[in-house]
Image: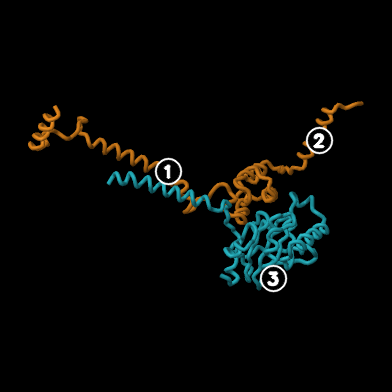
């Protein structure tokens, strides 16, 4: 039997893919509730060495270690919060993607809300000031009677001059 | 008055934003807040990488200031800092190594110990040996307790076994001056 070259290449590449797949560690928990916690944690815990990757996304050694530890802890029946606390005790708040509300971080929520409130206040007062410059009929409150006779005389002179 | 404000407010905002961005340009991009600092080091019982029958515990850090250096033969930056660490040892600084094993799964692909010991001897022979001894963190679990993210990292542990400094990255003259020298009575 003679195998054509394309078929040989296909077989070899298929074998390589199968081997590459087999070496990737997969974590499977029998209990669906635990599996759910593990999957959530995988996407909420940050790899402390990489820039902005979860331990689920990263293949850095430390991310693999944390993933394995998370798996072990969840498997042994630890709750989600207990695992997060375990990681925070070692790698700090940074390791969890959800920032805690503290006197410093509260501004992350307060500032944007504050900006909106201030913007509305500015708009409100700007409109009220613009309105108060006009009287009820919507006319300018300045009337010709308010001007002094001298001013009127001068105005007439100027008008004559540029006639 | 209004005109001056209309000029000054945007100018002030511009200067503030420029200052902020300029600071960002020169800041350290890595977030570095170590949890282990000012806490006693976690308990451990680790074997000597050269003689696994010998076990070390926390006691080994009591009574004198020690640098705990996390390293491995696979780590290129570690090779770069070894000569500097050796220099520090000559000046009388006590340095203990925490050998950080590189493998994806500690249950498998373990290098045979004699081969690892040979590689360690090779590397220390080539770049200098700053270590009193090396503790073997086979599955990197003690590293995890310390908050280690990779190698090299260096901890300064005081006479009472409390972590004073946790430095991520290589140790050199500049880092020594900035972070470590004040604990050794140098200015």
Chain B shade in the render: cyan
Q: Which of marks 1 and 2 is nearer the N terminus?
A: 2
Disc 3 marks which residue?
B90
Chain at tag 2: A
Query: Quadrant where the C terminus of chain B lies?
Result: bottom right
Distance from the alpha carbon under mark 3 to that under mark 1 = 59 Å
Quick one: A47 or A39, which is closer to the camera? Answer: A47
Front: mark 1 or 2: 2
Q: Is residue A44 visible?
A: yes
Q: Is residue A14 left or right of residue B143?
A: right
For disc 2, the neighbor class at 10 Å (few under 14, some 14 to 19, many from 20) is few
For disc 1, the neighbor class at 10 Å (few under 14, some 14 to 19, many from 20) is few
Query: Where residue B39 sits: x, y (%)?
Result: 60, 64
The image quarter containing residue B158 is bottom right
Q: Which mark is residue A15?
A: 2
The answer to whether dots 3 and 1 both sit on one chain is no
Disc 1 marks which residue?
A113
Query: Where residue B152 sits: x, y (%)?
Result: 67, 57
Task: Indicate whether B138 appears above or below B162.
Answer: above
Quick one: A17 or B35, which is closer to the camera? Answer: A17
């Amino acid at each position: 039997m003679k195998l054509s070259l394309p078929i040989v290449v296909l077989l070899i590449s298929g074998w390589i893919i199968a081997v590459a797949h087999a070496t990737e560690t997969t974590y499977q928990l029998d209990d669906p509730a635990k599996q759910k916690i593990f999957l959530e944690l995988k996407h909420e815990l940050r790899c402390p060495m990489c820039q902005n990757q979860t331990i689920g996304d990263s293949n850095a050694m430390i991310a693999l270690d944390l993933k394995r530890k998370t798996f072990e802890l969840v498997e042994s029946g630890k709750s989600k919060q207990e695992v997060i606390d375990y990681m925070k005790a070692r790698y700090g708040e940074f390791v969890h993607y959800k920032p805690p509300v503290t006197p410093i971080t509260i501004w992350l929520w307060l500032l944007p809300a504050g900006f909106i409130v201030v913007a509305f206040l500015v708009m409100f007062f700007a409109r009220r000031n613009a309105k108060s410059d006009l009287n009820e009929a919507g006319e300018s409150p300045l009337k010709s009677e308010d001007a002094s006779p001298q001013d009127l005389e001068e105005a007439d002179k100027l008008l004559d001059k540029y006639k | 008055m209004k005109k001056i404000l209309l000029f000054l407010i945007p100018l002030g905002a511009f200067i503030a934003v420029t200052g902020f961005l300029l600071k960002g340009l020169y800041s350290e991009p890595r977030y570095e807040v170590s949890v282990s600092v000012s806490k006693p080091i976690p308990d451990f019982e680790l074997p000597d990488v050269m003689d696994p029958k010998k076990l070390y515990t926390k006691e080994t850090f009591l009574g004198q200031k020690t640098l705990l250096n996390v390293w491995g033969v696979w780590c290129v930056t570690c090779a770069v800092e070894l000569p500097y660490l050796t220099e520090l040892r000559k000046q009388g600084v006590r340095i203990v190594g925490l050998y950080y094993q590189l493998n994806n799964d500690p249950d498998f692909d373990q290098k045979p110990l004699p081969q690892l010991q040979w590689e360690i001897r090779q590397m220390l022979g080539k770049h200098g040996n700053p270590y009193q001894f090396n503790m073997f963190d086979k599955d990197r679990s003690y590293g995890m307790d310390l908050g280690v993210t990779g190698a090299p990292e260096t901890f300064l542990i005081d006479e009472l076994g409390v972590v004073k400094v946790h430095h991520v990255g290589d140790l050199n003259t500049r880092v020594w001056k900035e972070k470590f020298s004040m604990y050794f009575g140098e200015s």
